[in-house]
Amino acid sequence: MLVITAPTGQIGRQVLDKTLEDGRPIRVIARDPAKLPPHVRERVEVVEGSHSDPAVVTEAFAGAGTVFWLVPPDVRAESVEGYVLGFTRPACEAMRNQGVKRVVGVSTLGRGVAKNAGQVSAALAMDELIEGTGVSYCALRMPGFMENMLQQVMPIKHQGMFFTAISPDHKLPTCATRDIATVAARLLLDDSWSGQDGVPVLGPEDLSPNDMARIMSEVLGRPIRAQQVPGDAYLANLTRNGITQGWAQGLVDMASEVEQRAIYNAEPRTAEATTPTTFRQWCEETLKPAVLS
């Protein structure tokens, strides 16, 4: 039995689609099962509720060999690490008690480098918590997602710009969620691996915000530029938009570590870590339709 958390989210939905192709039994944890497409509900076992709930994960992990683990972000959380670890602790207890053998988790780059890096530090602490159960654990180590740019569709469309908390010339890896889902599904369907390790998912190339702006300009057929926002202004803008002070500060701290300590650049780029979807392809297939709609 394979258990998938967050099956209606951006990554989990794609992981579920890819693992369904294999035909093995799948159980999902869904807060709102009605959000699952009808053809999916017919093919999976559904445990209703939140995967932060001890009773829910205990039920869902019973008889499970492998779990896909993802902590969804919560911009209402007062403490980033408190939220992430509080969400994960019941699952760790259920992993121990229910005999889960393998876990594939959505994590981050920066292990061994990041210090006070907000959401990055919280994800790395999550990895350590899961590893402490003794389960075989594979942490997917990612930089920022290309899909994060969808949060800036309106300024791209109406102002010809997007905002960044890092230097416009700082080159970083970036990956598409479709490639994360592909790597996750491959690991979830492979019963041969064991131990505890991380798998980098780096996308095909390192790009600066200025590089991204140039590509967007070419794809959209109009000039787009990257506008850097200082940390204090970035924080103020986040909180004005309803994000808690604690969650917003985590994002600011993460951006600072990405800029100052190059936490996303520490992982060597190898053929195995390089995934296929280019930023240009993603812009053509995803961003452009969103901007034009």
Image (cartoon, rainbow, N blue to C red):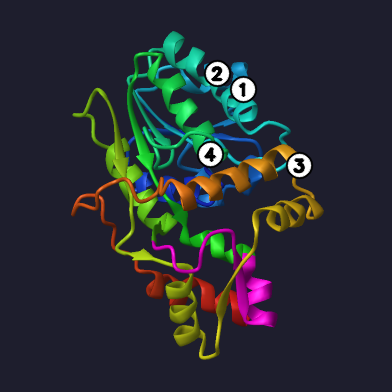
- Residue pointed to by mark 4: 117
Could you tell me residue 236's position as x and y percent? 76, 53
> What's the residue at 44%, 37% (across, down)?
114
Residue range in magenta is 152-171
- Residue pointed to by mark 3: 244
Is 23 drawn above or below residue 94 in the view shown?
Answer: below
Q: Residue furthest bottom?
A: 221
From the viewer's side, name the closer residue of 163 and 178. Answer: 163
* Crowding at mark 1 (Cα within 10 Å: few <14, some 14-19, many 20+): few
| Nearest to N terminus: mark 3 or mark 4 | 4
Which label belongs to residue 232? none
- Please state, as top left, top right, bottom left or bottom right, where the N terminus lies in the image: top left
| Nearest to N terminus: mark 4 or mark 2 | 2
Q: Is residue 158 magenta?
A: yes
**Amino acid type, callout 1:** Gly
> What's the residue at 33%, 49% (across, down)?
201
Q: CA distance from mark 3 to mark 1?
A: 17 Å
Q: CA distance from mark 3 to mark 2?
A: 23 Å
- Kindly indicate the quadrant of the structure image that contains residue 138: top left
Q: Are marks 2 and 1 in contact (CB under 8 Å)?
A: yes
**Amino acid type, callout 3:** Thr
The mark lying in front, picked from 1 and 4, is: 4
